[in-house]
Image (cartoon, rainbow, N blue to C red):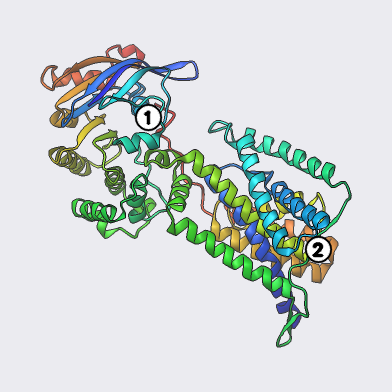
């Protein structure tokens, strides 16, 4: 569904992605693990069109996403739940969902989708008129997911969905990830919680210092080793 | 007591145009997180277009008003393209300095086209003042207040009831997230600039129609009044801009009554100073939301 090939993204002279190639299969959950600074968020931001790559291609269902604006990429069916959630703090929960549907014009369907998401996230229904900035971290994460789903994505990208959340909330987030996938959404997520990620992933990649260093299915690599490499990298001295 | 109420009344009516100036200013600041020092001079360009039509072609009040608003909006688009669109995120100082340079450019351009110091501006509503019990209300002041209230309501409705407004508020909330939900941030920013400059154009028109004359210094005047009113109320806050504008008008009216026109601006700046010391975010402003910490670190 998504094919990334030889992707190079740089901040000034520093290349954060040094030729990343990977694929996301339709209908599955693909996880990307790796230590801080590996370039995971840069990859997500590049796929979503926020950052422009120097080289390489990103193909989504055959269409090249490189050079398209974030708005066009959302319209193509790719939505990103960004790291740190980035909800719109001075807007209500309801307005955040409405903003998620910004690219759509079918207002009746938009209302129906919002209703379905309130079914899935009852906490959001309770707080629909509350300002998003006043929600707890876990609620904001639910809202960020719901907002992204409002664009009816075929591929949902999630960047560190469990970051900074209490263990019980992390369990909830991963339960939702499983549900979304069973309902037919393809997911590609960056996670620092390797244990949790390996439980849901159909396929995973390890990334270190701007390169993909392992690709396989859970079980192909001992969890200990995955965790060590995901947190510390292969070359410990570099951390 | 009657004097006090009359001064407050006069001040609030004049202040309604300051509120509009601050509203336009704060729209730009909210969307860009950058100060547009050229804001006043873009309004002055609109006003000069208006007075040119009036002096050369005998245009009436309606045509002058339209020309002022349209001219201000176009000049605003020019400033956005030149000083804001090309500057990378995080280069706020570059935008501010270049908007200062364009201020000088616009002022000199106005002087080149219309070299006399003052030009006539057609009055808006002539006639005897209305009496409200012991108080007097000038017709043009009343028109100013009504027009300002209507326009501020209109801007509020645009921001809260339209898709365009939703996109703008998304940009204000978090520009990266606005991109991610599919807002065309560049286009919306340009449109916000045009809207803000047009709002400033209406304010400029209302003020000049009361003064019945325009000078090239009007640009500086408008930037100052808008900036002070915005800072009193709180950067980036729309209710703050309205409150700041009305308050600034009232403070000026009282200061002028008690201390005379020369001391008036000193009092204004003293009040601004006090407000900023006691409440650095302005009277009802909030601290700007934390920037997307995640992004840029990757």
x, y percent for residue A190:
27, 29
For the image, the number of numbered tags is 2
> Residue at point 74% right, 65% down?
B252
B48 sits to left or right of B197: right
Q: Residue furthest bottom?
A: B133
Separation of marks 2 and 1 at Cα, in angstroms: 54 Å
> Residue at point 50% right, 38% down?
B186
Q: Are marks 2 and 1 in contact (CB under 8 Å)?
A: no
> Residue at point 58% right, 63% down?
B151
Residue B274 visible in the picture: no
Q: Which element is circle 2 on?
A: loop
A57 sits to left or right of B132: left
* Chain of residue at mark 1: A
Would you identify the image quadrant in which residue B268 lies? bottom right
A131 sits to left or right of B104: left
Would you identify the image quadrant in which residue A230 lies? top left
x, y percent for residue B109:
79, 41
> Residue at point 28% right, 49% down?
A139
Q: Which residue is mark 1?
A: A45
Q: Which residue is mark 2?
A: B212
Would you identify the image quadrant in which residue B245 lies? bottom right
x, y percent for residue B101:
73, 36
């Amino acid at each position: 569904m998504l094919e990334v090939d030889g992707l190079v993204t740089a901040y000034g002279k520093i290349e954060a992605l040094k030729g990343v190639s990977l694929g996301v299969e339709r209908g599955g959950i693909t996880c990307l693990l790796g230590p801080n600074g590996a370039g995971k968020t840069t990859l997500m931001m590049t796929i979503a069109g926020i950052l422009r790559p120097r080289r390489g291609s990103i193909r989504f269902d055959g269409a090249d996403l490189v050079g398209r604006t974030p708005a066009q990429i959302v319209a193509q069916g790719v939505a990103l739940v960004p790291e740190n959630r980035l909800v719109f703090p001075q807007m209500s929960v309801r307005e955040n969902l409405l903003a998620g549907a910004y690219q759509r014009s079918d207002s009746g369907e938009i209302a129906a989708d919002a209703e379905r998401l309130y079914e899935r996230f009852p906490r959001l229904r309770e707080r629909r008129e509350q300002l998003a900035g006043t929600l707890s971290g876990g609620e904001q994460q639910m809202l960020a997911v719901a907002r992204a789903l409002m664009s009816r994505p075929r591929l949902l990208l999630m960047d560190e969905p469990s970051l900074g959340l209490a263990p019980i909330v992390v369990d909830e987030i991963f339960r939702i990830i499983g549900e979304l996938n069973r309902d037919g959404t393809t997911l590609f997520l960056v996670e620092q919680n390797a244990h949790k990620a390996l439980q849901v992933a159909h396929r995973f990649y390890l990334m270190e210092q701007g390169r993909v260093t392992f690709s396989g299915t859970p079980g192909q690599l001992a969890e200990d080793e995955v965790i060590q490499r995901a947190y510390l990298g292969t070359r410990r001295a570099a951390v | 007591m009657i004097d006090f109420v009359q001064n407050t009344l006069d001040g609030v009516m004049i202040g309604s145009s300051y509120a509009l100036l601050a509203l336009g200013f704060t729209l730009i600041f909210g969307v860009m997180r950058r100060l547009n020092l050229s804001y006043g001079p873009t309004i002055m360009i609109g006003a000069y277009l208006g007075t040119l039509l009036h002096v050369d072609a005998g245009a009436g009040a309606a045509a002058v008003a339209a020309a002022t608003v349209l001219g201000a909006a176009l000049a605003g688009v020019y400033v956005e393209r030149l000083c804001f669109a090309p500057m990378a995120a995080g280069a706020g100082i570059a935008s501010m300095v270049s908007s200062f340079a364009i201020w000088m450019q616009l002022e000199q351009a106005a002087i080149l086209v219309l070299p006399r110091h003052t030009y006539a501006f057609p009055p808006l509503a002539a006639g005897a003042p209305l009496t409200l019990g012991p108080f007097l209300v000038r017709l043009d002041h009343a028109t100013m207040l009504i027009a300002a209230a209507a326009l501020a309501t209109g801007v509020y409705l645009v921001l809260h009831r339209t898709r365009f407004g939703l996109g703008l508020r998304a940009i204000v909330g978090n520009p990266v997230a606005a991109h991610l939900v599919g807002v065309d941030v560049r286009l919306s920013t340009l449109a916000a600039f045009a809207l803000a400059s047009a709002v400033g154009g209406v304010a400029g028109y209302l003020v000049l129609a009361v003064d019945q004359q325009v000078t090239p210094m009007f640009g500086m005047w408008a930037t100052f009044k808008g900036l002070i009113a915005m800072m009193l109320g709180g950067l980036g806050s729309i209710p703050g801009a309205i409150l700041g504008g009305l308050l600034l008008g009232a403070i000026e009216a009282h200061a002028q009554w008690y201390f005379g026109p020369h001391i008036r601006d000193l009092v204004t700046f003293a009040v601004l100073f006090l407000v900023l010391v006691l409440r650095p975010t302005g009277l009802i402003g909030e601290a700007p939301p934390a920037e997307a910490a995640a992004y840029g670190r990757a």
